Amino acid sequence: MLEKISSFTLPVWRSPKVILAVSVFLNFAGFTLIAPVAPFLVTQYVSPDRLAISVSMIMTLYAVCQFVAAPVLGALSDRLGRKPILIAALVGSATGYFLFGTAGSFWMLLVSRAIDGLTAGNTGAVYAYVADTTEPGSRGKAFGVLGAAGGFGFLIGPAVGGLLGEISLSAPAFAAAGLAILNLIWVIVALPESNFGHCRSSSLTLQQLNPLSPLVYALRLPLIKIAFASAFLFYLAGTMLQVNIAVFAKDILSFEPLEIGFLLCTVGVLDIISQGVFAPRLQAIFGELSTAVAGLAINALGLMMVAATVDITSSGLLFGAIAIFTLGDGFYQPSMSAVISNAAPGDQQGVVQGANQAQQSIARTLGPLASGALYQLSAGGPYIAGAAVILASMFFAGKIRKQPVETDDRRQPRSSH
């Protein structure tokens, strides 16, 4: 696969690396376009005392739908190819964003996020595509580039969303739908398939279409099982911050959509720097696992600083806390993604990446619920609890060092033919 794709000299606009990086950028830009206005949209349909839990419900539903769909889409990408799954995901995103902008009730907001969640296979498909076309030793750097592209989307999306939100609360959702449509057209026209017929999974069974089946399979691989435990706790803590930070800024510091947009821009700036610049250099010097552990330590510090903002009501402290949190995030994500990808069997990259996305979805299902409940008790509660969860993630990341480094050539159990 590596040789077949790299043997062609393609114009920049048809380069898979460029298309995937821009696709990740547009994906994050679209998602974060609606973030600054989400609390204000929800406020139109619920009472103020129900705002935090209602925003959490939207995030939880998205994660549940993603959990159901992501492993299935991952298995389908192993059998049918990566490109069809990317196309389906982009169609779903465009539809979901459009409905989010036209929703006239809280229930329609839920429906819009459900549609987007059910077709949220783009992340797993993109990472599987990179695994198809990149040597194992270079995947950490490649994932870092994707992370930086996502960070750039995180930089542009909230700022533009905040500005558009000053015009209309629906405008960011329509802009996100437009970005998804443009991305869809580009993928259809220019992206070559990476998972060629002779390299695809030999069959597709009903067992593989069970959302839990790829996850159960991945958890049988010793190294991946421990890496998944660390990643699950990381995403659980991260979601506890992400789902609530706009509400937190609105309640504690009286931020408006534009100010929330600039706060989220901090995430984008640091994502670009940490994943695109620092992480690859740290990986080359200290290795991917050590870089991931360092990222977790920095992550925990950032969460504790957010909690401190409750008592020290300073916008500067909150911006600094988010910057530090994101720096750790940028070290951890591409590094652990490389650990997981390198431990996966070659013809099961889609299954493992889908399983990874599924366990992230479980974390993103539980995270909003925990965050909403803790926030009702104390505004700093989600962030103190998140820091404790990050320490548990560090424990599992440390256990990876004790595992033998080997290529696991087992394949997912299949039904009898």
Image: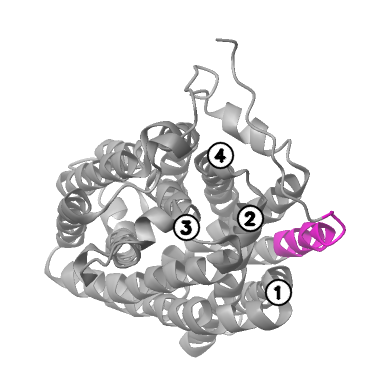
Q: Left of 255 or right of it: where is 14?
A: left
Question: Disc 3 or 2, which lies upstream in sequence?
Answer: 3
Q: Which numbered circle lies on residue 243?
A: 3
Q: Amino acid at mark 4?
A: Gln
Q: Main secondary structure of the magenta part?
A: helix
Q: Residue furthest top?
A: 417
Question: Disc 4 or 2, which lies upstream in sequence?
Answer: 2
Q: x and y percent of residue 249 in the render?
A: 44, 72
Question: In the image, is residue 410 above or below residue 29?
Answer: above
Q: x and y percent of residue 75 in the render?
A: 48, 33
Q: Which numbered circle lies on residue 392?
A: none
Q: Left of 183 or right of it: where is 316?
A: right
Number of other residues with Cα within 10 Å of mark 4, as a class: few under 14, some 14 to 19, many 20 or more: many
As measured in the structure, the alpha-carbon distance from the residue carrying label 3 to the one carrying label 2 is 30 Å
Question: Can residue 251 be seen here?
Answer: no
As measured in the structure, the alpha-carbon distance from the residue carrying label 3 to the one carrying label 1 is 31 Å
The region drawn magenta spans: 388-404
25 or 417: nearer the viewer: 417
Would you say the residues marked 1 and 4 are in contact, meaning their CB atoms lie under 8 Å apart? Answer: no
Question: Disc 2 or 1, which lies upstream in sequence?
Answer: 1
Q: Which residue sits at x=66%, y=32%? A: 217
Q: Which numbered circle lies on residue 287?
A: 1
Question: Secondary structure beneath disc 4?
Answer: helix
